[in-house]
Amino acid sequence: MTKTADQVWKNCLAIIKDIVEWQHFKTWFEPIKPIELKDKVLTIQVPSQFFYEYLEEHYVTLLAKTLKRELGKDANLEYRIMMDSGSKGAEPITMDVPGQGYKTYTNNEMDFPLVINNPVKNPFVIPGLKKVQIDPQLNPKYIFDAFVEGDCNRVARRAGKTVAEKPGATSFNPLVIYGGVGLGKTHLAQAVGNEVKRLHPNKVVLYVSSEKFINQFVDHSRNNAINDFIHFYQLIDVLIIDDVQFFNRAEKSQDAFFAIFNHLHQSGKQLILTSDKPPKDLEGVQERLLSRFRWGLSADLQVPDYETRIEILERKMKNDGLEMPKDVVKYIAYNISTNIRELEGSLISLLAQSSLNKKEIDLDLAKKVLKNFVKTSSKEITIDAIQKMVCDYFDVSYDKLLQKTRKREIVQARQITMYLAKTFTKNSLKTIGEHFGGRDHTTVIHSCQTVKDLMDTDSLFKESVMELQQKVQLAAM
């Protein structure tokens, strides 16, 4: 019986589902659609260029093995990548690429190059205007060495490094960095700019906030000099715009930025944007701009986990030549979990009080000084509350959490719940086990050890556990 593309892919998914984490399966495999099976070559459709690159980097071996198991050793995989046409209502553009290795492709239907190897020459020639020395408006302290990498920011930081090495020549154009207040968006964006200046001294780099861009546009509008304003920005090799969400109240500034964006992108110049939301959630921004924001990579910055917070504190102490007892560092890192700005602020407050009062820094002083930063626990967290959080997080029903099943996603959810119950409650191992269908204390011990081992070897699993830990901490405040 001849197999179809749907059958082959369905069989592959059945294998993959038992191997990868449930959340990762839902994120990276469920959106894939099988398109065609011809001569043992399976073509699958993915929603974006970044999606394709992520699969190739993280799951290429798994895909290859499962496909060969279905079709034999001569099996091959091809991708069909969906691209934004840039025009509202237009049919989406697709392009086919082979698996296992990146390559440059063009599409005659596209009004912009996907990857630019020979940048388009600037079509705007302004008599008498030369590339003069432009102040990049960068803070020299914002560099990659001062930006601590963790699970919360790894994708964004590494994408920034890639962009700095080859500005305008990667598929990360534009690079959109988004996240909440105080998580390091400005630092990372400017770090890219500073690294570009170090590696490519002849590149013209400019950092500007969206508010300053809007104010400049208004000033030039009053002087009937909008063309000069646009032409100036079209001279930039690496343009960094901070807080693009504020464009929502400036329609005409968006029109100017649209012209600048198009020219820079088509000329192989790099754009780096920061926002407090992902592009899909930006309100009041023109759809044609949002579609262009989605051409490249959108990378988020999340709240740093406990280990990353400790490293941030230790890095700052080292840079400032400071020393502090380890238990104090751990106390600050454990209790200040909202953002990096508040974390560093609490450290400065503690050092200031120590200096002014001429007291040694110890845990008692830290608790007194940081009472304005730290919310004391007002309620005791229960096993039932933790079970509900984990069930909601993994989209697993409470009944399944108690069942005797060997399904990977259920087993891991149960093990994580036991681990969190042991960490955040005062219940005995026996009591914890009784909350899971009468399991004994040895099962709880085994589950906790399994979670610890997986956190040491699986960064994605660790990220899930750390996120849940933070949810439990917040619930107890």
Image (cartoon, rainbow, N blue to C red):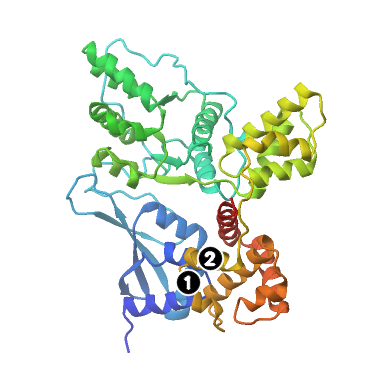
Whether residue 73 is visible here, answered yes or no, is no
- The residue depicted at 67 percent of the width and 44 percent of the height is 333
| 265 and 158: which is toward the camera | 158
Relative to residue 299, is residue 435 drawn left or right? right
Relative to residue 398, is residue 234 drawn left or right? left
| 406 and 294: which is toward the camera | 406
Residue 315, given in percent of the width and then of the height, sits at: 69, 36
- Residue hosting label 2: 390
Check contact, mark 1 vs mark 2: CB within 8 A: yes
Counting other residues with Cα less than 10 Å from the Cα at mark 2, is it few (<14), some (14-19), or many (20 or more)? many
Q: Is residue 387 above or below residue 212?
A: below
Element type at mark 1: loop
Compute the Cα span from label 1 to label 2. Answer: 8 Å
Element type at mark 2: helix
- The residue depicted at 45 percent of the width and 35 percent of the height is 167
Relative to residue 273, is residue 412 drawn left or right? right
Residue 115, given in percent of the width and then of the height, sits at: 37, 44
Q: Amino acid at mark 1?
A: Val
- The residue depicted at 50 percent of the width and 39 percent of the height is 160
Residue 438, given in percent of the width and then of the height, sits at: 64, 82
Residue 161, given in percent of the width and then of the height, sits at: 53, 39
Q: Is residue 346 above or below residue 436?
A: above
Earlier sequence position, callout 1 versus callout 2? 2
* Quadrant placement of the N terminus: bottom left
Q: Quadrant of residue 368?
A: top right
Counting other residues with Cα less than 10 Å from the Cα at mark 1, is it few (<14), some (14-19), or many (20 or more)? some
- The residue depicted at 72 percent of the width and 77 percent of the height is 441
- Residue hosting label 1: 396
